[in-house]
Amino acid sequence: MSAKRPIRDLERDLKREPQNLALRLTLAAAYREAGRTGDAVELYRTVARAYLEQGRPGQAAAVCK
């Protein structure tokens, strides 16, 4: 299966569950593996900000590594 198919599925799922941080991380990893670095970085930053807003700085820092 090509990398694009799972990415499309993940993007569709994220539209249904935009607050799902685990799904955002999974999609970010898929983007990274597919060479879509800019898209991956954008999602990682979004997740890190969400963790900070939730008072979870350790998890925010882990996302940035």
Image (cartoon, rainbow, N blue to C red):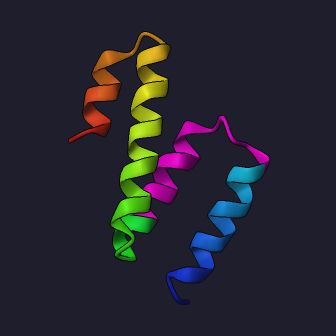
Look at the picture and state if 37 lies above or below 28.
below
Residue 4: quarter of image? bottom right
- In-front residue for pair 11/22: 11
> Residue 36 in the image: x percent, y percent?
39, 70
Look at the picture and state if 4 lies above or below 21.
below
Q: Which is the main secondary structure of the residues drawn in magenta?
A: helix
| 26 within the magenta span | yes
Q: Residue furthest top?
A: 55
> Residue 23 in the image: x percent, y percent?
57, 48
Q: Residue furthest right?
A: 16
Look at the picture and state if 33 lies above or below 54.
below
Left or right placement of residue 33 versus residue 24 in this view: left
Residues shaded magenta = 16-30
Q: Residue at x 53, y 47 (%)?
A: 24
> Residue 10 in the image: x percent, y percent?
63, 62
| 18 within the magenta span | yes
Residue 6: quarter of image? bottom right
Q: Residue at x 36, y 52 (%)?
A: 41
> Residue 1 in the image: x percent, y percent?
55, 90
The quarter of the image holding the C terminus is top left
Q: How many marks?
A: 0
Q: Residue at x 55, y 38 (%)?
A: 21
Q: Residue furthest left?
A: 65
Left or right placement of residue 59 versus residue 1 in this view: left
Q: Residue at x 46, y 48 (%)?
A: 43
Left or right placement of residue 46 versus residue 63 in this view: right
Residue 38: quarter of image? bottom left
